[in-house]
Amino acid sequence: MTSSNIAGAGAAKAPAPVTVLAGPTAVGKGTVSAAIRERYPQIWLSVSATTRPPRPGEIDGVHYRFVSEDEFTRLVEADRMLEWATVHGRHRYGTPRGPVEDMITAGRPVLLEIDLDGARQVRRTMPEALFVFLAPPDWDALVARLVGRGTEDAEERERRLRTARVELAAEPEFDRTIVNDTVEQAADELAALMGVRDLT
């Protein structure tokens, strides 16, 4: 896999108002997004809505927007969700449309960090967005990251690795690929694709 041609990306046209970051399980999407939040505060990172209750330490409006089942249903029925899904047959997660549109109007670069199914939904509703696939350096690196997290038992790891093989095959659906060799490098490449440079 090769990373994006950043120079070519910047020269071709103005950056898209919305960038969607997706990739296989355990590739480090959340870690790269956290690095974007820290290193590039001018980029607005979308906050997903969810019907699950907050976990200890989670802050409403920062980690997630915690809503009731009824409110989530109202957002879906009013076409106010760019994408959404029911995860593990229990709680619903999705990207509210309103805040994204507000940030576009304000001229802020917008980043959505979502899963592959969500990215496909956003492509249907917002085809002008830039779709970026975050890839591991190689398969062994992805396996090492998943095992190293230590958050899943052996059966769950195998299930996630089977899923990851399917997810990796989706790379050609995306406009650009960034290889996550290091978090800082991946965040810098992503910010450059979005037309943003480090302020430091």
Image: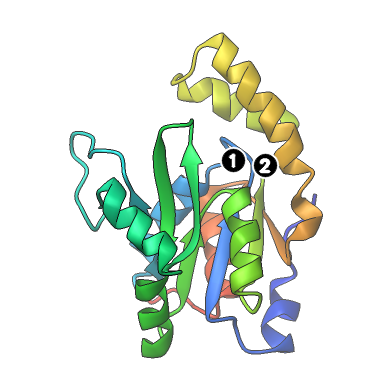
Above or below, 136 relative to 110: above
Q: Residue at x 19, y 49 (%)?
A: 59
Q: Looking at the picture, how far across and down is residue 200, in whole percent?
A: 37, 73
Instruction: Say if 138 sits above or below 189 in the image.
Output: above
User: How far apart are the alpha carbons under marks 2 and 1?
Assistant: 6 Å
| Residue at image mark 2 | 136
**Location of residue 112 with respect to 163 vertically, above or below:** below
For label 2, the SS is: loop
Q: Residue at x 36, y 55 (%)?
A: 73
The residue that appears at 41% across and 32% down in the rendered structure is 90
Q: Position of residue 113 (x, y in %)?
A: 49, 56
Outermost residue toward the top in this view: 154
**Disc 1, SS:** loop
Residue sitting nearer the eye, 72 or 108: 72
Q: Going by the image, does 195 lie left or right of 35?
A: right
Is residue 193 at least partly visible in the picture? yes
| Residue 143 as seen in the image, left or right of residue 105 | right
Q: On screen, 29 above or below 193?
A: above
Q: Which mark is residue 131?
A: none
Q: Which residue is mark 1?
A: 27
In the foreground, 129 or 93? 93
129 lies left or right of 97: right
Q: Residue at x 51, y 22 (%)?
A: 148
Indicate left or right for 190 with 67 as reference: right
Q: Quadrant of residue 33?
A: bottom left
Q: Are marks 2 and 1 in contact (CB under 8 Å)?
A: yes
Tell me, yes or no, if residue 42 can be seen here.
no
Q: Residues within 10 Å of mark 2 (few under 14, many from 20)?
A: many
